[in-house]
Image: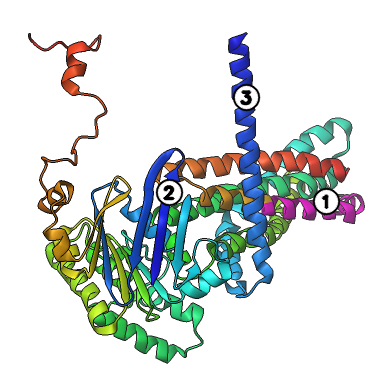
C-alpha cells in the first residue's frame, strides 16, 4: 500500500532518518518500534505526509506521495485517520463534535445519520454516553479512545497510531491495543503503529520494523523479531541496559572528565 | 579589524533573518488569504472569529474610549483656555479621536486583548498537535485557522474604532460641557464644521490597515511559534510587541498620506 524508498530526514544538520526502506502492507498492521530518539515518530509523520522527507521516495498505491498536489493529498487523507500521541482533540469541541468533525466537514449526511455513526464509533471504543464531555474533562485513556473514534469515523482505509499506549495504565493500554487489533482483524483497516511498548507492539503486529539511530536494523514478523540473532534487537526486546545500544548519551567519559579536566574535583588516587 | 568584520557579519545575518521572516509572513498570509475564494467557504468561521474578537473587546474599547475622551476634554480645555478658544474644544476632541487616537488606541487594545489570545490559541494548537490533526482530517489549517482570523480582525477593528470614537466624543462632551461649562451649541457646531469626510476616511483607512496588520502578525507568530510552553509564551509577548510597534510605524505612514 505504502512503499518508502531511501527515506532520509534531517533537521538542520541533525539526521533523524537515514536511507529507510519500508513497505506498509494493505489490511495488515505494521508496527514501527525503536528506542527514544530512534526516528519512529519522524518516520510516521513522513508516511502520513505531515512533513516532507529531505530525500527519498514515498509511494501511496503507486502515486508519488511526496510531490503530490495539496488537493490530491487532502482527497487521500479523507481515507486516512491518525491517533496522535497526546490525542490532539480539538479542545473547543465536545466529544460528539470531535468524533463527528470529519463527517460534518466532508459529507452531506443528515445530522441523524451522523449521530448514529458517532454513537456506533463511541460504543466501539466504550465511551457511548460521554458525548457531552469536553476534552479537558477526559482522562488520558479516554482522550486516546475518543481520538481513535474520531480517526475511524470516516471508515478510513489506513489508520496511523503514534504511541497509542504511552502514558496509559495497563488496562487502558490493553483496551487500546485490542481495539487496534480488532480494526485490522474485523474491519480490515491497514494500521501503522509507532510504539516502544514491545509486548503490545509484537502482539498486534503482522509486520515489525525496528529502528535504531534513524536506520532500520531489523524487520519481519513478530516471531522473526523475537528470535532475531542481532544483539541490538535482543537488547531492545529484553529491555536490557547492557548491550550494543548504549543507555548513556554523554559524549565524554565522566570519570575521564573528573580525572583530567581542569577545575573539577579530583578523584582520590 | 577582525572584530569589526565579525560584527558586520552578525548584523548582516540578523538582517537576513529578519528579511526571511518577513518573506515567510508575507507568503503564509497571502497564501492563507487566497483561500477566501476557494471552497469550502469559511464564512461561518469568519463570523465566529468576528464574534470572539469583536464582542470580547467591546468593554475594553468602551472603557478606553470613555477615558480618552474625558482626558482629551480636560487637557484640551486647559490649553484652549489660554487662547480664549474654549469653543473649539468639540472640534479638537473630535479631530484627535477620529484621525489619531481612536484608530491607534483601539488597535492597541485589540492587540492586547484579542491579538495576544489569537497567538496563544494558535501556538497551543501547535503544541497539542491540533494543527497536525486538522491536516490529517483533510482540513487546510491555513484556511481554517489563519484566514478567518485575519479577515475577522480586519473587519471588526473599524467597527470597534467607530464605537471608540462615538464613546470618546460623548465622554468629551460630558466633561467639556457639563463639568467645564463649555457652550453646548459651540461644542457641537465647531465639531460639525471642522470634521470633514476626509478626516473620517483617514480614520477608516487606518482602522482597516491596523486590523489587517494585527491579524497578520498575531496569526503568523502563533502559527510559527516553537511548539513548547515557553515558545508559546515568547510568541505571545513578541506578537503584542511587534503589533504595537507595527501600528505606530503604519500610523506614521498613513498619516503622512492623509495630511
Which residue is the extreme one toward the front? A229
Q: Which residues are magenta?
A: B183-212
Quadrant in which the C terminus of chain B is drawn: top right
* Residue carrying label 1: B202
The subunit carrying tag 1 is: B
Percent position of residue A87, x then y: 33, 63
Distance between mark 2 and mark 3 Cα atoms? 31 Å
Nearest the viewer among B214 and A195 is A195
Pointer 2 with pointer 3, Cβ within 8 A: no
Which residue is the extreme one toward the left? A269
Give the prevailing secondary structure in the magenta stretch: helix
Q: Secondary structure at mark 3?
A: helix
Q: Secondary structure at mark 2?
A: strand
Q: Is residue A143 left or right of residue B117?
A: left
Say few, some or many: other residues with alpha carbon within 10 Å of mark 3 (under 14 / 14 to 19 / 20 or more).
few
Q: Secondary structure at mark 1?
A: helix
Q: Is residue B223 left or right of residue B73?
A: left
Say few, some or many: other residues with alpha carbon within 10 Å of mark 2 (under 14 / 14 to 19 / 20 or more).
many
Nearest the viewer among A78 and B39 is A78
Percent position of residue A247, x then y: 18, 38
Circle number at residue B11? 3
Circle number at residue A9? 2
Amino acid at each position: 500500500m505504502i512503499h518508502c524508498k531511501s527515506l532520509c530526514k534531517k533537521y538542520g544538520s541533525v539526521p533523524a532518518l537515514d536511507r529507510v526502506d519500508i513497505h506498509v502492507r494493505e489490511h495488515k498492521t505494521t508496527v514501527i518500534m525503536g528506542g527514544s530518539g530512534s526516528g519512529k515518530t519522524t518516520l510516521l509523520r513522513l508516511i502520513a505526509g505531515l512533513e516532507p522527507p529531505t530525500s527519498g521516495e514515498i509511494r501511496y498505491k503507486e502515486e508519488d506521495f511526496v510531490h503530490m498536489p495539496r488537493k490530491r493529498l487532502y482527497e487521500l487523507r479523507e481515507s486516512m485517520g491518525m491517533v496522535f500521541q497526546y490525542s490532539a482533540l480539538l479542545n473547543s469541541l465536545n466529544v460528539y463534535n470531535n468524533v463527528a468533525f470529519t463527517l460534518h466537514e466532508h459529507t452531506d449526511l443528515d445530522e441523524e445519520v451522523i449521530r448514529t455513526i458517532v454513537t456506533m464509533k463511541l460504543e466501539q471504543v466504550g465511551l457511548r454516553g460521554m458525548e457531552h464531555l469536553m476534552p479537558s474533562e477526559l482522562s488520558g485513556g479516554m482522550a486516546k479512545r475518543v481520538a481513535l473514534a474520531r480517526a475511524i469515523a470516516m471508515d478510513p482505509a489506513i489508520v496511523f497510531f503514534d504511541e497509542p499506549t504511552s502514558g496509559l495504565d495497563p488496562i487502558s493500554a490493553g483496551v487500546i491495543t485490542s481495539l487496534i487489533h480488532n480494526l485490522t482483524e474485523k474491519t480490515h483497516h491497514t494500521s501503522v503503529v509507532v510504539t516502544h511498548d514491545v509486548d503490545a507492539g509484537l502482539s498486534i503486529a503482522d509486520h515489525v520494523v525496528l529502528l535504531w539511530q534513524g536506520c532500520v536494523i531489523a524487520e519481519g514478523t513478530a516471531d522473526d523479531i523475537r528470535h532475531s540473532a542481532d544483539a541490538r534487537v535482543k537488547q531492545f526486546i529484553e529491555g536490557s541496559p547492557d548491550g550494543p545500544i548504549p543507555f548513556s548519551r554523554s559524549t565524554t567519559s565522566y570519570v575521564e572528565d573528573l580525572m583530567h579536566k581542569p577545575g573539577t574535583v579530583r578523584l582520590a588516587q | 579589524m577582525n572584530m569589526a568584520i565579525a560584527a558586520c557579519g552578525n548584523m548582516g545575518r540578523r538582517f537576513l533573518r529578519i528579511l526571511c521572516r518577513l518573506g515567510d509572513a508575507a507568503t503564509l498570509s497571502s497564501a492563507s488569504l487566497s483561500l477566501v475564494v476557494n471552497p469550502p467557504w469559511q464564512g461561518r468561521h469568519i463570523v465566529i472569529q468576528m464574534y470572539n474578537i469583536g464582542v470580547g473587546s467591546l468593554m475594553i474599547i468602551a472603557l478606553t474610549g470613555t477615558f480618552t475622551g474625558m482626558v482629551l476634554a480636560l487637557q484640551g480645555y486647559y490649553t484652549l483656555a489660554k487662547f480664549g478658544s474654549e469653543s473649539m474644544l468639540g472640534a479638537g476632541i473630535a479631530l484627535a479621536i477620529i484621525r489619531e487616537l481612536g484608530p491607534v488606541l483601539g488597535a492597541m487594545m485589540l492587540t492586547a486583548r484579542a491579538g495576544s489570545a489569537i497567538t496563544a490559541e494558535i501556538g497551543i494548537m501547535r503544541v497539542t498537535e491540533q494543527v497536525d490533526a486538522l491536516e490529517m482530517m483533510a482540513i487546510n489549517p491555513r484556511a481554517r485557522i489563519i484566514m478567518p482570523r485575519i479577515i475577522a480582525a480586519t473587519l471588526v477593528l473599524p467597527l470597534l474604532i467607530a464605537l471608540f470614537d462615538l464613546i470618546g466624543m460623548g465622554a468629551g462632551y460630558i466633561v467639556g460641557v457639563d463639568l467645564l461649562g463649555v457652550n453646548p451649541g459651540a461644542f457641537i457646531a465647531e465639531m460639525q464644521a471642522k470634521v470633514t469626510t476626509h478626516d473620517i476616511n483617514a480614520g477608516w483607512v487606518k482602522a482597516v490597515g491596523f486590523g489587517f496588520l494585527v491579524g497578520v502578525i498575531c496569526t503568523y507568530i502563533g502559527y510559527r511559534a516553537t511548539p513548547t510552553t515557553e515558545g508559546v509564551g515568547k510568541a505571545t509577548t513578541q506578537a503584542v510587541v511587534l503589533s504595537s510597534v507595527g501600528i505606530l510605524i503604519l500610523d506614521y505612514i498613513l498619516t503622512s498620506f492623509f495630511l
